[in-house]
Image: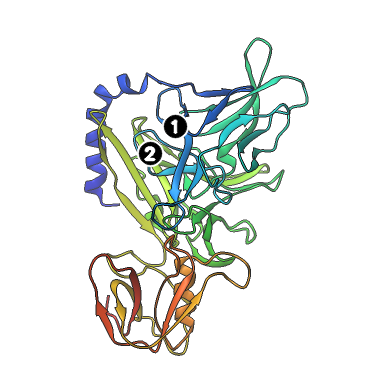
Amino acid sequence: MDSSKIFLLILLISFLQMGFSSYVSIAAESDTLKQGAKIRDWEHLTSAKAIFKLGFFSISAGYSGPNNLENHYLGIWYTNVPNQPVWIANRDSPLPDSSGSLIIDAHGKLKISYVGGMITVSNVSTMSGNNVGATLLDSGNLVVREVDGNGRFGGVLWQSFDYPTDVLLPGMKLGVNLKTGHVWKLTSWLSDQVPGSGAFELGLDVNGGTNQLVVSRRGKVYWTSGVWKNGSFEKAPDVTEGEMVLGFKFMSNEKEKYFSYSAKHNDMFTIWKLHLLGQIEQSFLVIFNMRERIWTGSYASECRPSLERVCLKENPVSCRKSSDVFVETRGHFDDGNISYVKDSPNGYRLALSDCHSICWKNCSCTAYASYSTDGTGCILYTNAHNFKLAAIHESYIYRLIKEHKS
């Protein structure tokens, strides 16, 4: 990250510390869900200092019109950034309507109840007869704990930090529990409108045994950070560029092996996000006067994103050069052939990165686009060359530019 940006963040924090505490000390809603209670579609849990909220949110199912459907999800987000969930309970099982409620059943399991059935969030049961409560902590972690007759909380039975989606918050881990075999990893969204499990995963090199981060693409190694050495990754020092405001840690012992980070300033909110095209995005949020927000970001990946270039790396093929790239453009072709691919032969829904890969490997393919308005599936253009720019309302087409010079 640019050092001037980090300096700006630190400067803002110095102002922030004078006025932020009065904001975070008041929570308008409860931070704990008790057995017998429920969180309905329009209600929330709010962490003690009002840093995070948990509740239901909706995303359009992929088309607009009088009968527009919306998929509903249970998620956690920074209170001041409600449109960017950092964790989703039912990312691959969206609710079709707003009938959902979060409950704790008689066995202590955290579940989403809706008109169409039930989705289990935590599958840990209590055998002692104690009640169970689910608390949203100021770290963004949702923890399920036993509650004794005096209302005192016991140990953690289950926590959302063990089941991340595409975001790594301070205190979360990437790695493996060597005792249980449980793996902590991030999985990208399928598209901007579909938070379901996508094409990329980020974790530690658990199988290879090296102390490095690995991004895999559909089960194959896509990017590696190089080994952890002297507080940084050898091949990707930009991953830990924010060391002035973040603390990075790599832990390896007989119980667990993981990478994590912490924020050095309590008034700075930060996330690591695995982008749907495989980049690792670092973002910082500073709240000033309880309203203004500043995000800065840096990326670690095989290439640097640009305004038009699709930032994806493909293996060499006979008909493509490394300088050939796809660019994002609004328009259409007046010639060529069009084919449609909705799903992979392996049964998973196709993401935009899958369309990129399919078109790259096909020497006749000159462009691709998303098949559905939710950003999934593929439209492939073969032997098409007569491209016409179009108005802003036209859909995006990703067309091949030969011998492109970066």
Mark 2 crowdedness (10 Å alpha carbons): few <14, some 14-19, many ≥20: some
Q: Amino acid at mark 1?
A: Lys
Give the x, y percent position of residue 203.
Answer: 55, 54
Q: Amino acid at mark 2?
A: Pro
Q: Quadrant of residue 263?
A: top left
According to the picture, the residue beneath numbered tag 2 turns out to be 82
According to the picture, the residue beneath numbered tag 1 turns out to be 53
Secondary structure, mark 1, is strand
Q: Quadrant of residue 29?
A: top left
Q: Is residue 7 above or below residue 102?
A: below
The Cα atoms of the two marked residues, 1 and 2, are separated by: 8 Å
Instruction: Single out the residue that lies furthest toward the front.
Output: 66
Secondary structure, mark 2, is loop
Give the x, y percent position of residue 302.
Answer: 41, 67
Residue 231 in view in this figure: no
Q: Is residue 325 above or below residue 146?
A: below
In percent of the image, x 55 and y 37: which residue is there?
A: 100
In percent of the image, x 38 and y 35: which residue is there?
A: 264
Contact flag, marks 1 and 2 (Cβ < 8 Å): yes
Residue 157 in view in this figure: yes
Give the x, y percent position of residue 30.
Answer: 48, 21
